[in-house]
Image (spheres, grey):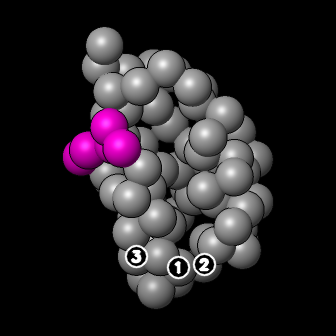
Amino acid sequence: MKRNVSLIVGGMMCKHCAKRVEDALYEVKGVSKVNICLETKEVSFIFKGEDLSVFNNVIEEIGYELLKIEEK
């Protein structure tokens, strides 16, 4: 099942930060089409998986804070 997921990531300030978040998300099986807006700190992507809670660990492991997660 494809899910459109949106995250708000705290601490993401620059293109380097965005690239780090993008790379970490692409390491999660089932993640595709990652888009990042630094201005709003929003990260959107498609996820073919069940457990959205995995993203909290992914974001925290690279030093950022997951402020919000939602399915659109």
The span from disc 2 to disc 1 (Cα, nearest Å) is 6 Å
Q: Quadrant of the C terminus?
A: top left
SS class, disc 3: helix
The magenta segment is 29-33
Residue at far top of view: 1
Which residue lies most toward the left here? 33
Residue bearing the label numbered 3:
19
Q: Nearer the viewer, mark 2 or mark 1?
A: 1
**Labels 2 & 1 near each other (Cβ < 8 A):** yes
For the residues labelled 3 and 1, say whether their Cβ atoms are less than 8 Å apart.
yes
Look at the magenta stretch and give its main secondary structure: strand
Task: Write the residue at 52% across / 50% down.
Answer: 42
Q: Amino acid at mark 3?
A: Lys
Which of the numbered marks, if any, corresponds to residue 17? 1
Res. 41 in view: yes
Q: Earlier in the sequence, mark 2 or mark 3?
A: 2
Is 20 drawn above or below residue 29 in the view shown? below
Residue at the disc numbered 2: 13
